[in-house]
Amino acid sequence: MFEEATVIGFETDEARLLADFDTRLIEGFGLPDDVERFDLVRAMNVLRGYAPSECAEAHAQWLNWLGEGGVLVEGTTTPDGDLACFYEVTCDTEQLVLSRNRSSGRGFAPWMLRDWLPKLLRRSVKPGTQEYAFFDDWTAAWSKVRGDDEFQLSIEALDHYDVSWEGDETSDWLVWQR
């Protein structure tokens, strides 16, 4: 799938550069001179230290770099990667993906994911917002189904949100069409 794709990954830590893709250690957000458009722009854990206005500027710039059908993936993970929250954005759609590693041994509750939301969303989860209501509703659904498959079953109970569950024996993924 990626053999012919033009991919760029922004990374702030040289040790995490991906050998399989054109992943570059980037100072700032300038467009590399050697490529006009990308099929995938990946920026995980890059915007954590930036102000929300700078994050919005980076998103706009990265979206302008996408070719037809291209995807921007931007978000944050825990240091061990057990929790991840990221946007998947195309020219036409935006979805928020929230995931957890089932085999981490870490307990789970929906509110655990709030602090790992993408920077543009993280601090806006306040009473009265759609995001706060979502986490509150998800927690209520989760509290009724705690135990095996609690992630999946609690998501399936959120029928008034455009969410779906994907997963396997190692990971759970909530996909929220926004």
Image (cartoon, rainbow, N blue to C red):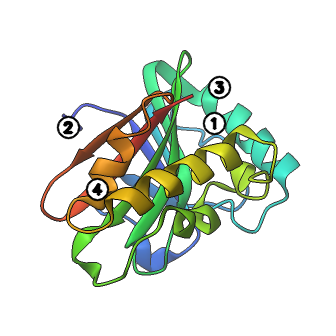
Discs 3, 1 touching: Cβ within 8 Å:
yes
Dot 4 amino acid type: Asp
Q: Label 3 belongs to which residue?
A: 64
For the residues bearing labels 3 and 2, Cβ distance under 8 angstroms? no
**CA gap, disc 1 and disc 2:** 21 Å
Sequence-wise first label, 1 or 2: 2
Q: CA distance from mark 2 to mark 4?
A: 27 Å
Image position of 84 (left or right of 31): left
Q: Of the residues under marks 3 and 2, which one precedes in the sequence?
A: 2
Please identify the quadrant where the C terminus is shown.
Answer: top right
Q: Residue furthest front?
A: 144
- Give me the C-alpha separation between circle 3 and circle 1: 5 Å
* Residue 63 shows in the view: yes
Q: How many C-alpha atoms fall within 10 Å of the one at disc 1: few (<14), some, or many (≥20)?
A: many
Q: Residue at x 63, y 54 (%)?
A: 118
Q: Which residue is mark 2?
A: 3
Q: Earlier in the sequence, mark 2 or mark 4?
A: 2
Up the image or down, 150 lies above or below 39; here it is below
Q: Which residue is mark 1?
A: 62
Q: Please name the residue shown 67% across and 44% down the image.
A: 133
| Observer-nearest of 52 and 65 | 52
Query: Could you tell me if the residues under marks 1 and 4 are in contact, i.e. CB atoms within 8 Å?
Result: no
For the point 58% across and 65% down, which residue is it?
A: 116
Q: State which tag comes first along the sequence, 4 or 3.
A: 3
Tags 1 and 2 touching, CB below 8 Å? no
Q: Amino acid at mark 3?
A: Asn
How many residues crowd around disc 3 within 10 Å: few (fewer than 14), some, or many (20 or more)?
Answer: some
